[in-house]
Amino acid sequence: MNKMKEKVKRMNPKKGFCNLILCAVVFCIIAGIGTAAKFGSRIPEMKQQIEAAEKTNEEIYQNTSEKERDREENRHEKEHEFEWNNIVTLTTSDYVFVGCVMAGFWIILCIYWLYTTAYVVSKSWEVGANAWIFGILALVTNLFGVAVLWIYIKMHLVCRECGMLQPRNANYCSICGSAIYIKCPDCGSRISIHDEYCNGCGRKMRS
Ligand SMILES: [Zn+2]
Ligand SMILES: [Zn+2]
């Protein structure tokens, strides 16, 4: 468990996110330039091919409906013959290129997903929340898990000494024992140990 903690901490999710965004941007630029270089010059040609195919499709549709008005099925079959692959001729290198772009996209998505989970797990450890529950939630639901952890932290007090979560009504931290809330000596209001003034009577708390 400790070894795992070290590993996740060494991942440094925040820094990792920045690197990941950088990678994603570079990937998009490369993929964009690649797509433009690969298909840009062929767009007019592709347009012609699509237009020609649509025309043929239309003709066949009309002819079929005239000749075989009753045979709906036949017409549908004919329509299905015009798939994207038949309209535009794709070469092997086209498929390889599209495959690489898709693979890159999936790799970046997977790394992003793992980093989100790592962030939630390490944050849970940091504040003393249940890392298993929040980690699994983040692994399954991604950003929803992050939001739930965030709300969970907001529902608690964070001890300023040790950083652990404490119940909202706690006066002392149950982990390190330092005071969180004290009573104002003048009016008895419950005030934070870090308040400058009492918000019940305005007494200056720290000199
Ligand atoms: Zn504490
Ligand atoms: Zn007071």
Image: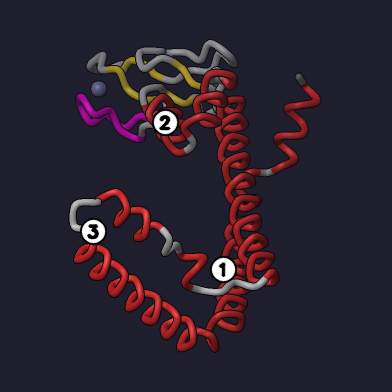
Label 3 Cα crowd, 10 Å radius (few <14 / some 14-19 / many 20+): few
Q: Which residue is disc 3 drawn over? A: 68
Q: Is mark 1 within 8 Å of ligand 1?
A: no
Residue 45 vs residue 107, the one in the foreground: 45
Magenta residues (range): 196-207
**Quadrant occupied by the C terminus:** top left
The location of residue 206, given as percent across then percent down, is 40, 32
The amino acid beneath tag 1 is Cys
Q: Judge whether residue 42 is colored magenta.
A: no
Residue 111 against residue 80 in the figure, above or below:
above
- Count of all numbered marks drawn on residues in the image: 3
* Mark closer to the chain start, 1 or 3: 1
| Residue drawn where x is 71% and y is 42% of the image | 11
Q: Which residue is disc 2 drawn over? A: 194
* Mark closer to the chain start, 2 or 3: 3
Mark 2 and mark 1: span between their CA atoms? 48 Å
- From the viewer's perspective, tell me whether residue 48 is left or right of residue 1: left
Residue 44 against residue 151 in the figure, above or below:
below
Q: Judge whether residue 200 is colored magenta.
A: yes
| Picture quarter with ligand 2 | top left
| Residue drawn where x is 47% and y is 26% of the image | 158
Q: Which residue is disc 1 drawn over? A: 28
Residue furthest toward the right? 3
- From the viewer's perspective, tell me whether residue 142 is left or right of residue 109: left
- From the viewer's perspective, tell me whether residue 101 is left or right of residue 49: right
